Image: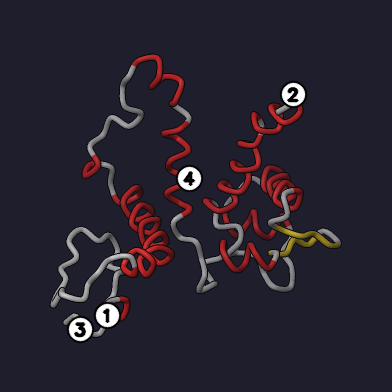
Amino acid sequence: MNADAIRELAVSYQKSRILLTGYELDIFTNMNETGTTGKQIANKLHLDENACERLLNALVSINFLTKQNHLFYNTIDSYTYLSKNSSNYLGGLMHTNQLWNTWSKLTQVVKTGNSANSSIINERGEEWLFPFINAMHDRAKKQSAQQLANIDLSEIKSVLDIGGGSGHIQWNLFPKNLK
C-alpha cells in the first residue's frame, strides 16, 4: 500500500455519505424519466435548492445520476437498485444509513468500552425497526436458498421459523417432503 491508496481509503466515506444521503432523501425514486432539474427535485422533496443541486452533481460525479442540459437522470443501476419504483429496490440500505451513526462513534467506543448505541433494541422505535427488517429481508433473499441447500432436510417433516425477520424463508425454498 502507498500514501495515495491510504489517502483514497481515508476519504472513501465521502462517496458513501453522498450515496446514502441521496438514498435517504429518496432522490432516485423521485427522478422523472424525462429528466429532472435540481429546482424540481428540491421543491418536490422540500430541500434547499442550492444544496440539492450540489448533491445531485455529487451523485453525477460518482455515477449514480447523469446530467444533460441541466436535467438529471437516474442511471440504469440507480433506478434498478435505489428507486422504490423498481422490483429490485434495496430497501435494506436505510439500515446501512442508520449504522453510519453507530460507526461514527467507533473512536469513543474504543476509548471507553461503552456501546455505541445505549438504547435497548426494542426501544429504538419504528424508524429503526422497519429499515432493520428490510435489511434482514434483503439478506434473506440473497442467502436463504443457499443456506437451506447446505442443510440435510431429508428426514425433516416440518420446519418452524422463529424470529425470521420479514418471513422471507418460504415453503417453496424447502424440499418437497416438508409440509
- Give the alpha-carbon distance from disc 4 to disc 2, as whole Å: 29 Å
- Give the alpha-carbon distance from disc 3 to disc 1, as whole Å: 6 Å
Q: Is residue 48 left or right of 115 when viewed as pictured?
A: right
Find residue 63 and report its image quarter: bottom right
Identify the mark at residue 97; answer none if there is no mark.
4
Nearest to viewer (mark 1 / mark 4): 1
Nearest to viewer (mark 4 / mark 3): 3
The disc, 4 or 2, on the residue closer to the chain's N-terminal end is 2
Residue designated by label 1: 175
Residue designated by label 3: 177
| Mark 2: amino acid | Ala
Evaluate if marks 3 and 1 touch, with contact meaning CB atoms under 8 Å apart. Answer: yes
The local secondary structure at tag 1 comes to loop
Residue designated by label 2: 3
Q: Residue furthest right?
A: 69
| Mark 4: amino acid | Asn
Q: Is the image coloured rainbow, by chain, by secondary structure, or in one colour?
A: secondary structure
The disc, 2 or 3, on the residue closer to the chain's N-terminal end is 2
Q: Position of residue 91 (x, y in %)?
A: 45, 60
| Mark 1: amino acid | Pro
Label 2 crowding class (10 Å Cα cut-off): few <14, some 14-19, many 20+? few
- Give the alpha-carbon distance from disc 2 to disc 3, as whole Å: 58 Å
